[in-house]
Amino acid sequence: MTYLLYLIMGTDFAERHAEEVVPMVRKYETAMQRPETKLLPRWMTPAGRYLTYVEARMQVLVGAEVETRCRDMQRYKGNVEYIQQVLNRVGDKFKEGTSTLVSR
């Protein structure tokens, strides 16, 4: 999981947030597979509420990273991680729209 974080978000982000994100995403995956999160509204179960919490937290973390990179595109332009490749192609065109769809 840590390796994927490096590939998707880059070294700086991974080193700053891996300690928080990796266990959170692992627990998210388990919660997502629970029967109650598939059958009931999220607010009704602890696992469902955890899914909502993780999505909101990731929106904050990734959103801040996108903002930072968009403010100084030249600094990050040569980076090879996935998030930067997307930003190099489309810039900040979809930064607000895509992140809000995830949490609904």
Image (cartoon, rainbow, N blue to C red):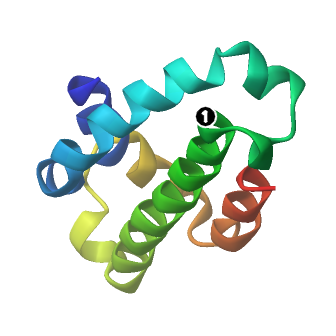
Q: Quadrant of the N terminus?
A: top left
Q: Is residue 88 visible?
A: no
Residue placed at 42% from the left, 28% from the top?
27
* Horizontal relation, residue 2 to residue 52: left or right: left
Residue at image mark 1: 47
Q: Amino acid at mark 1?
A: Ala
Placement of 91 over or under 17, stated as above or below:
below
Find residue 78 and report its horizontal and vertical position in percent. 25, 55
Placement of 54 over or under 46, stated as above or below:
below
Residue placed at 35% from the left, 72% from the top?
69
| Residue in the foreground of this view, choosing between 12 and 70 | 12
* Horizontal relation, residue 21 to residue 18: left or right: right
| Residue in the foreground of this view, choosing between 101 and 79 | 101
Q: Quadrant of the C terminus?
A: bottom right
Residue placed at 51% from the left, 49% from the top?
54
Find residue 94 and report its horizontal and vertical position in percent. 70, 66
